[in-house]
Image (cartoon, grey):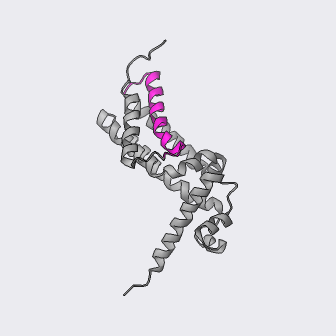
Amino acid sequence: MQHATNPRERVRDTKTEIHRAAVELFSSQGYEKTSLREIAEQVGITKASLYYHYSSKQDLLRAIVGTFLDDISRVLSQVDELPWSPETERELLGAYVDVVIEHRSTGPTLLRDIAAVLAAFGDDLDRLIAQSRRFQLWLAGPDPSPADRLRAAAAVETVGAAISVELDLGVTDAEIRAVLLDAATAILARRGTAPETT
């Protein structure tokens, strides 16, 4: 005998489907060119049903990008509590990589529609940028040289490659994680050395 589906589960499924459809459409055609009607049609619901879950397109964007920004902020804020060491560096860098991989479908929206993201988040982004700068300085290690600070920025940007391109390489998230973490730590491993000049 089948049990009736819990209405709360149906609501949760619909929100997930809306979220997924919006990410796909925002990524492929951009935030500005995507209408709520298109998102509703892709999910198979009415526009009125979509409004039940999200009051506006910006509200939907905040839900999609906001989760990513909150998770990144949670990781970056740990630099204020953790003293730098090779072990804590790898641990925190690993947590950063995990969040970037988890939210990599959001990346194209972030990069393609930065004006919409700025309008939706404003001060939150300023706070995140300040946290990112502290994270990079922390990654540069104790008493960093300008070259060490540049290496730390390069390590963070290397991880960011996971959200700037569609990584459809036929590999698992664990493999992507290992490659990104190895690449970032390889850059940081040259800390304290003079750059080679040619």
Q: Position of residue 161 (x, y in %)?
A: 50, 39
How many numbered badges does the structure rendering display? Answer: 0
Q: Could you say which is closer to the camera, residue 171 or residue 105?
A: 171
Q: Is residue 69 visible?
A: no
Q: Is residue 89 magenta?
A: no
Q: Is residue 153 magenta?
A: yes
Residue at the left extreme? 87
Q: Name above or below for residue 184 compared with residue 107.
A: above
Question: What's the magenta region?
Answer: 141-167
Q: Could you say which is closer to the camera, residue 103 or residue 84?
A: 103
Q: Position of residue 125 (x, y in %)?
A: 56, 46
- Is the magenta region chiefly helix, strand or loop? helix
Which quadrant holds residue 142? Answer: top left
Residue at the top extreme? 198
Residue drawn 44% across the image and 33% down it: 155
Q: Is residue 104 left or right of residue 53?
A: left
Residue drawn 46% across the image and 45% down it: 169
Q: Could you say which is closer to the camera, residue 42 or residue 105?
A: 42
Q: Is residue 76 visible?
A: yes
Q: Name above or below for residue 28 compared with residue 39.
A: above
Q: Could you say which is closer to the camera, residue 178 or residue 111?
A: 178
Q: Name above or below for residue 4 compared with residue 74.
A: below
